[in-house]
Amino acid sequence: MTEADADDGAAAERDGPADNGHDHGGSHGSGGDAHDDHTHVAGEDHAHDDHHHHDVDSLGVAVVTVSSSRTLSDDPAGDTITATMEAADDEVVTRELIPDDYDRIEGTLDNLVGREDVDVVVTTGGTGVTPDDVTIEAAKRLFDKELPGFGELFRLLSYDEIGTKVVATRATAGIVDGVPVFCLPGSENAALLGAEAIISEQAGHIAGLAKRDE
């Protein structure tokens, strides 16, 4: 299978927030400032802790490569996702390679989200615009909730590297039966970008929220 040009996306650098330069001194006096600052920070900490209370600390990850030409021994994108998630202290509990077939993709995803040891599914391949790129169609059929921000952020981070070619990738994510499913392009660079810059940072939080009421 030939992936779209957009599958050649690479990780973009991200800058931290700049100092806003606010001066908390002035006529209020040091005692008042200290009290106000303490109250504000305590409130923020409580809200942050409550919002992340359900985060999954160590994820069980299923990695699925969608390709009719590769094998598990020749799967650099799958290798990259596996290494990145394991470096984040998550466990890759299963890894599969399936052809570009709508029914196989849908059936595989449906089976994986039903496993007790799978908290997150990451697919690579089949997100372009060639006729056999059907990963997105198969995955979206299963989505209970779509996460459009994932694809938007992925394309934003890819833009500095590949420019307007990002329009040819349809990377996306969604929730299936309480399990986040992330669909990445099939290139090694795109897999690194998605897994390292987004999925490894947010998957535990999203997985916890998706299962919060269970």
Image (cartoon, grey):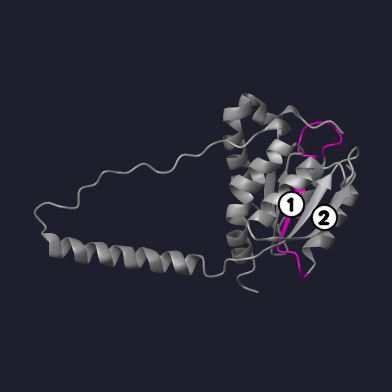
Identify which amino acid the numbered label 2 is placed on.
Answer: Arg
The residue that appears at 71% across and 63% down in the rendered structure is 119
**How would you rate the neighbour count of disc 1 (Cα within 10 Å): few for under 14, some for 14-19, many for 20 or more?**
many
**Residue 97 visible to an observer of this rendering:** yes
Q: Is residue 214 left or right of residue 22?
A: right
Most common SS among magenta residues: loop
Numbered disc 2: secondary structure: strand
In the image, 64: left or right of 194? right
For the N terminus, the image quarter is: top right
Residue at 84% in and 44% down: 66
Reading the image, the residue beneath label 2 is: 95
Q: Quadrant of the C terminus?
A: bottom right
Residue 88 lies, in percent from the top left, at 63, 56
Residue extending furthest toward the bottom:
214
Q: Nearer the viewer, residue 144 or 86?
A: 86
Residue 145 showing in the rendered view: no
Q: Magenta residues? A: 116-133
Which mark is drawn over residue 3? none
Q: CA distance from mark 2 to mark 1?
A: 9 Å
Q: Position of residue 209 (x, y in %)?
A: 59, 64
Q: Is residue 132 magenta?
A: yes
Q: Residues within 10 Å of mark 2 (few under 14, many from 20)?
A: some
* Residue 124 percent across, percent down from the top left: 77, 44
Name the residue carrying label 1: 82
**Image height check: is 39 above or below 159?**
below
Residue at 37 percent across and 63 percent down: it is 44
Q: Earlier in the sequence, mark 2 or mark 1?
A: 1
Q: Do residues under tags 2 and 1 come within 8 Å of each other at their CB atoms?
A: yes
Observer-nearest of 5 and 176:
5
Q: Quadrant of residue 167?
A: top right
In the figure, 119 relative to 73: above or below? below
